[in-house]
Image (cartoon, rainbow, N blue to C red):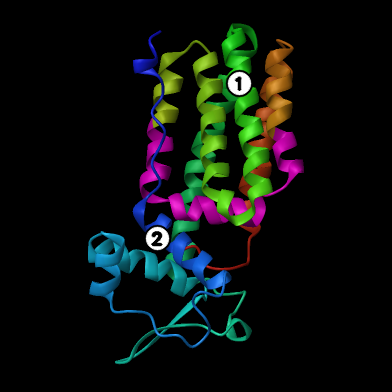
Amino acid sequence: MSQAFAKVARPRRLPDEIADRMAEAIRAGELRPGDKLPSEPSLATRFGVARSVLREAISQLRYDGLIEARQGVGAFIADPRSRSAFRIGPACFKKRQELLKLLQLRSGVSVEAATLAATARRPEHLAALEDCLDAMRAAIVRGMEGAAARVDAELRFYSTVAAASGNEYLEEFLSVLENRILSELHSVAVKNAMASEWSERVVGEHKAVLVSIRDMDPEAAHDAARRHFERAAKRLADRTDIADV
């Protein structure tokens, strides 16, 4: 097929991109504890975005404890010593519950797709799955900067599994769920990846799916996919750390 129809890279959400840039400036010491942030209109102009986008980015940093708001005064870089590692508000809990529901829904579809892929996969599917695993590992090496890439690589992995199943309806359904995560719960998914999916052991769960598909073992593929999604759901449900909003 012509390269003109190759997959389009998924752009990052603007609030996530801005929040990451500001967080990096804080970590690099360009913004220091106690420094006051420029006004919202000024920051929005500098980044070239609408104020609503800027507010969402600031909100992410505030709930991460990187920024503190002072009523009637403005927003300031927070002192690291005052940051709490255990703050989960109602909004955060609700978003995690939404992500958990989508994870549970993806589980059944992905398990079925993996089972079918073990008999229908083609060499190009195996190569694409290997690329996804490599991308996950590369993202982990990059640390926090690779968090969004880690989430995107995992989503691509199971989209590829669905494509390998030979059932276009499974592929289409997973695409709908994937778009929901990217458009509405991307920040939550990224922070969940950092908190509970950030290890070679978890990548090994995905590798077990790939190996079973490569070996054309439907039963093993079914069990490997089910095992990963069950463990991922438990890791998400068991989290008691920083907020996701």
- Image quarter of residue 211: top right
Can residue 192 be found in the magenta stretch?
yes
Task: Estimate the spatial distance between the alpha carbons at disc 2 and disc 1, rounded to whole Å.
Answer: 36 Å
For label 1, the SS is helix
Can residue 89 be found in the magenta stretch?
no
- Determine the residue positioned at 48% across, 46% down: 101
Of 218 and 28, which appears nearest the observer?
A: 28
- Determine the residue positioned at 72% across, 47% down: 199
Mark 1 burial class by Cα count in 10 Å: few <14, some 14-19, many 20+:
many
Of 45 and 242, which appears nearest the observer?
A: 45
Residue flagged by tag 2: what amino acid is it? Ile
Percent position (x, y) of residue 42?
26, 73
In what quadrant of the picture does the N terminus appear? top left
Question: Looking at the rendered structure, which numbered label has been put on residue 10?
Answer: none
Above-or-below relation of 63 to 201: below
Question: Looking at the rendered structure, which numbered label has been put on residue 114?
Answer: 1
Q: Which residues are magenta?
A: 176-205
Above-or-below relation of 105 to 211: below
Question: Looking at the rendered structure, which numbered label has been put on residue 18?
Answer: 2
* N-terminal label among 2 and 1: 2
- Determine the residue positioned at 22% across, 61% down: 50
In what quadrant of the picture does the C terminus appear? bottom left
For label 2, the SS is helix
Percent position (x, y) of residue 108?
55, 30
Mark 2 burial class by Cα count in 10 Å: few <14, some 14-19, many 20+:
many
Above-or-below relation of 165 to 160: above
**Viewer-nearest of discs 2 and 1:** 2
Of 75 and 119, which appears nearest the observer?
A: 75
